[in-house]
Amino acid sequence: MAKAFSLKIVTPEQLFYEGEVEMVVVKATTGEEGFMADHVWACKLLVPGPVRFKESGSPNFREAKVTGGFVDVRGDTLVYADAAEWKDESDGNSSHS
């Protein structure tokens, strides 16, 4: 099992997600970028698209959609998004944490 770290996805309205993850993949202006625990500091602008992450101990990735913002990777990873929704909300299903 990979080392876990804290991920927060924050919008102007709410703390959309908070949890322990092993990996997060975002769609930055330079393309898709993935981050794991102990990654060097990074700050990237995001374009509208998916934020995928693998929760600690889970074999599967969860996916949210953001409309833009930025990711700040330090000891923890913070995604500041203009807006966010779960991928399956467009299908009428919701599975919030």
Image (cartoon, helix red, strand yellow):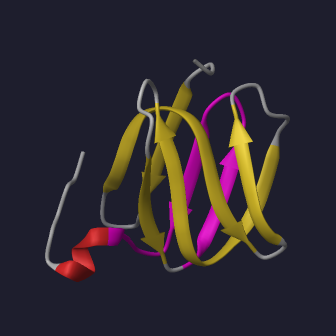
Residue at image point 41% right, 74% down? 83
- In the foreground, 79 or 33: 33
Secondary structure mainly formed by the magenta segment: strand
On whether residue 82 falls in the magenta region, the answer is yes
When the figure is inspected, residue 50 is found, relative to residue 52, above or below; the finding is: below
Q: Position of residue 72 (x, y in %)?
A: 68, 49
User: What is the x, y in percent for residue 25?
Assistant: 64, 54
Quarter of the figure that contains the N terminus: top right
Residue 34 left/right relative to 59:
right
Span shown in magenta? 68-87
Q: Position of residue 38 (x, y in %)?
A: 76, 25
Which residue is found at the position 60% from the left and 71% from the top? 69
Lateral position of residue 71 relative to residue 67, left or right: right
Q: Nearer the viewer, residue 24 or 10?
A: 24
User: In which quadrant of the rendered image does the C terminus lie?
Assistant: top left
How many discs appear? Answer: 0
Which residue is the extreme one toward the front? 59
**Viewer-closest of 23 and 77:** 23
The spot of residue 64 in percent (x, y) is 42, 64
